Image (tube, coloured by chain):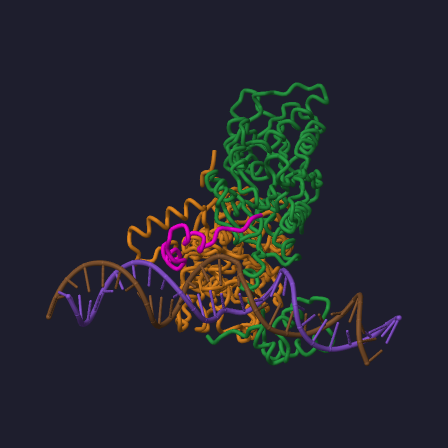
Chain colours: A orange, B green, C brown, D purple
Amino acid sequence: MRREVTLRDVAELAGVSSRTVSNVVNGYANVTERTRVRVERAVKELGYRPNVLARNLAQGRSGQIALVVPYLDTPYFSELLQSVIRAAKVSGYNVLIDQTDGDPEHERGFIAHGSRRLLFDGVIFSPLGLDQQALADRDPALPLVILGERTSDGTFDHVGIDDVAASRQATEHLLDLGRNRVAAIGDQPYATGEAAQRRTRGFREAHQARGLPVREDLIIGTPRFNRPDGAHAMAHLLELEEPPDAVFCYSDLVALGAIRAIVSRGLRVPEDIAVIGYDDIEDGRFSNPTVTTISPDKEMIAATAVERLLLRISSATPPPGLELRAPHKLIVRESTVGRSARPPSA
Amino acid sequence: MRREVTLRDVAELAGVSSRTVSNVVNGYANVTERTRVRVERAVKELGYRPNVLARNLAQGRSGQIALVVPYLDTPYFSELLQSVIRAAKVSGYNVLIDQTDGDPEHERGFIAHGSRRLLFDGVIFSPLGLDQQALADRDPALPLVILGERTSDGTFDHVGIDDVAASRQATEHLLDLGRNRVAAIGDQPYATGEAAQRRTRGFREAHQARGLPVREDLIIGTPRFNRPDGAHAMAHLLELEEPPDAVFCYSDLVALGAIRAIVSRGLRVPEDIAVIGYDDIEDGRFSNPTVTTISPDKEMIAATAVERLLLRISSATPPPGLELRAPHKLIVRESTVGRSARPPSA
DNA sequence: TGCTGTCTTTGCAGCGCTGCAAAATCGTAG
DNA sequence: CTACGATTTTGCAGCGCTGCAAAGACAGCA
């Protein structure tokens, strides 16, 4: 493996200084057409390509951002990841992934004061169990954008949809169908469950707005938002004396798990129990039945997060931490209205 | 944002040379206990953390590998990604993701001679439509491991399962159920469809081994292996005069799409048509019905790929390109045997 | 005590690039 | 023809680390 071509090699061939080559390569303004052409020819002739490592060191930045998520095999996160990568690439940034496996210790370590760094210029973080303490201990110099959980304390940006409104809308949809024993699966009534609690709030608001009582025993907590959580919770609900006739699930995976539990007991969705999910992952568009859901604008969330993060990175003085809302919409599919919605394919 | 603590700062405080500090930090052998302790104390006191960028430049390597996949929202790839990240981390490597969106031009560019590089020390590549030409044009100095498609030409490693054997096994499972009009969805009878063709070969072998004729009109091609592909192909099959009573799908997504198409026409799986998939993605474990599938050992595939890649990276002379096989197994679920298989949860 | 071999520490150069400020060049007005 | 401002080019230092080879310390042995 012979030595790579460097700026200096190009400079020599083109008969200019290496600094000028650098200027051309980086597209700086004040370069005469004549020199530009000469340099470009030399670049091509030698097959020069910049050494990113050296550039990074000289500039003191890595050109990379980290995306920290709990799990990657969760469709919501992988779909989000896809959008984040796309958005970052536009600005010439690479994305490093870190999976926390939902481990709070790991999450804390990532943003902790004095953690390893310099590998990335900023972090987009979708924490699962990040408490106040962790946020307080974090490296204040690390540009940070948080997705989903938490609300901003003013030192970082937070991007998400209006969970309360969306959840209210989802619940209202169920009530509109004439269901009157509506359950909720996914509550997390503890410090790290902010996002879940906002959904529960929307659930309550929908009932209150119609003067309906909330059946407290139909609000089921789950440690996570995965299929098994949904299946377990649903199994529990089905054993009640008076099972629900509709369920608001805090994620599509929970909904899929719940549907699975319902169907495996010989009941029908939505005839016996209507189910609505949250996230609009692809699975729900092809499941049987297809899943009615709240669809957050993921592209927008990703683009906004990246944009704000890059702003933070390039700002001398940190901009104020904003609370940013992406739009969402209700997508009605079979799990609440049955086959009347035509199948999505074929 | 004040200056970061450097090796030299630590050296000064500890009263040793900066080179010695480097030795300690990197855990080199020949350091006296006394100096080690002194240096470590100084490191802690100043809160020193190595500048990865500088280290990379000095070492001429980036400590990063790239994983290039067509899509990230495809569960198979995101599950694989997860395993790759995990395996790479063990060896201190970071993973950069690149999505090609299945664009052959993009795929080519990534490994092309003279492409941007240095950002990663090697590439794990899961190509969709990489032809001979692209492989020939590739940068020979770039350590490369390929997953899935293609077979090795000796200049790179290829990691995968034995597709032919697995497909044969899947088909035999359907035949064992007494089905005699078995279809296959996913063939790709053109240059870039090697993986698909191996599956078709296994499909044929299973028939031949039992002296059964292969119904050529029941082998359906699809451009990709996604849900809509499965749904379309299945819709076509259902319109035949004599529709199949079993289907071997070349991915679980195809299977899910096919099931969707079957069910939406009021038919039952597996009573009317048995369906088997390939990949063992999580979706198939919770779908309705759950999907019988070929389960490749993804952890093993990822670990092997990373291991071989790192070997390539650290070798002065490139090791021979190997053809590596990870194990797989048949997992029987409801889509072929019905509810007799107990539901996976609740 | 002097010499040799081994272990530990050091100094220097340099990875390839960019920031900075000075130098050179150019165009134009006086 | 000179002077001055604007534009273009250059040289240098240095980002913070590691490779290399030499120097120093130390122990063992004659």
Number of residue marks = 0
Q: Is residue B311 left or right of residue A156?
A: right
Residue at point 70% right, 44% down?
A: B342
Quarter-of-image position of residue A232: bottom right
- Residue in the picture at 57% in, 45% down: B141
Principal SS element in the magenta part? Answer: helix
Above or below A141: residue B107 = above
| Quadrant position of residue B32 | bottom right
Q: Is residue A194 visible?
A: yes
Is residue A173 in sight in this rendering? no
Q: Which residues are magenta?
A: A1-24
User: Residue C6 at what x, y percent from top left?
Assistant: 79, 66
Residue A2 forms part of the magenta stretch: yes
Is A178 above or below relative to B267?
Answer: below
In this view, B344 is above or below A145: above
Measured as percent of width and height from the top left, residue A7 is found at: 44, 55
In the rendered image, residue B118, in percent from the top left (x then y), is placed at 53, 53
Q: Which of the pair B14/A344 is nearer the observer? A: B14
* Rendering coords of residue B88 (x, y %): 63, 54
Magenta stretch holds residue B268: no
Name the foreground residue: B314 vs A236. Answer: B314
Q: Nearer the viewer, residue B291 or C3?
A: C3
Image side of residue B336 versus residue A320, left or right: right
* Left or right of C16 on screen, residue A224: right
